[in-house]
Amino acid sequence: MLELRNMTKTLGDKLVLRNITLTLEKGEILAVIGPNGAGKSTFFKCTVGLLQPTSGEIYLNGKLVKKNSAEMKQRIGFLGHESFLYNNLSPLENLKFYGKLYKVKDLETKANELLKEVGLYLFRDIPIRSFSRGMMQRLAIARVLLPDPEILMLDEPHTGLDQEAVALLNTIILKKRESGTSILIISHDFEQVQALADRAAVLRKGKIVSAKRLGGEVSMAELKQWYEAEVKGT
Ligand SMILES: Nc1ncnc2c1ncn2[C@@H]1O[C@H](COP(=O)(O)OP(=O)(O)O)[C@@H](O)[C@H]1O
Ligand SMILES: [Mg+2]
């Protein structure tokens, strides 16, 4: 379980995140949705440790997480707008590089299994520089899953993927939830939010203004209506 308490972030003289308090339960998929400029990526970066929040705390299973601790990096896997992959290395080499960094056990076996899972096994020894966006994203997902994180944070993971890659990503996300992983997805793709999320929270002007349980029981029309109302504010 991941808890954010009173997270704020100032960038320049702008208060981009305002007192965000949010809990991600074990085995839950939570979608954070909001318009452009609402602060979603800033929120993502502050939570995964790419940016230092101005104030606020993060608790992992009730324990305060120290900023930039190795523990946090091991236990929170994240996929942002950057893939952190090396173009001159093959998929297998990329995974082995990260696996060594994270001291992954049975690295060779695990890397090969993941490459099969994301459909890149046949391309495992080819430098990735010629790969398509979809193939890069598949490898980026494999990289994130390699150390077996208990929390997954994904910033707009479906962007730019073809249907097949979207389906694959969703299968992986749902499988991870089954095994108890907590997953936070930042998205503005309502179709994916409805397909995946147990709960959705609306971020508007740096604040979480509303949260709603979905769990497959809320129709697309209802979801959109709720979102529009919360974004406009009343
Ligand atoms: N380095 C920065 N300095 C000042 N303002 C920034 C900086 N980065 C982002 N912002 C502002 O913070 C707000 C939130 O940005 P962002 O987190 O990227 O939003 P989102 O991902 O929801 O589109 C925007 O208004 C943006 O202009
Ligand atoms: Mg963003």
Image: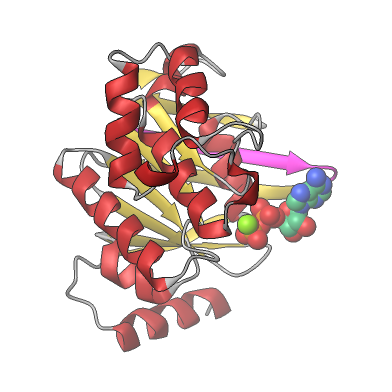
- Considering every residue shown, the one lying at the far bottom of the view is 221
- Total marks in image: 0
Q: Examine the structure image and report whether residue 8 is included in the region drawn in magenta.
A: yes
The residue at 55%/66% (across/down) is 160
Which is more toward the observer, 132 or 182? 132
Dividing the picture into quadrants, the one containing residue 86 is top right
Q: Examine the structure image and report whether residue 77 is included in the region drawn in magenta.
A: no
Residue 77 vertical position relative to residue 105 in the rendered view, above or below = below
Residue 119 vertical position relative to residue 164 in the rendered view, above or below = above
Dividing the picture into quadrants, the one containing residue 222 is bottom left
Q: Is residue 21 left or right of residue 27?
A: right
Residue 42 in picture, x, y percent from top left? 64, 46
Could you tell me if residue 108 is visible in this image?
Answer: yes
The residue at 38%/45% (across/down) is 122
Residue 204 in picture, x, y percent from top left? 57, 64
For ligand 2, the image quadrant comes to bottom right
The residue at 44%/44% (across/down) is 123
Residue 188 in picture, x, y percent from top left? 50, 69
Residue 149 in picture, x, y percent from top left? 34, 29
Give the colour scheme of this rendering.
secondary structure
Residue 222 vertical position relative to residue 34 in the rendered view, above or below = below
Extent of the magenta region: 1-14
Q: Main secondary structure of the magenta part?
A: strand
Which is more toward the observer, 5 or 213? 213
The residue at 58%/54% (across/down) is 40
Could you tell me if residue 5 is visible in this image?
Answer: no
| Quadrant the N terminus occupies | top left
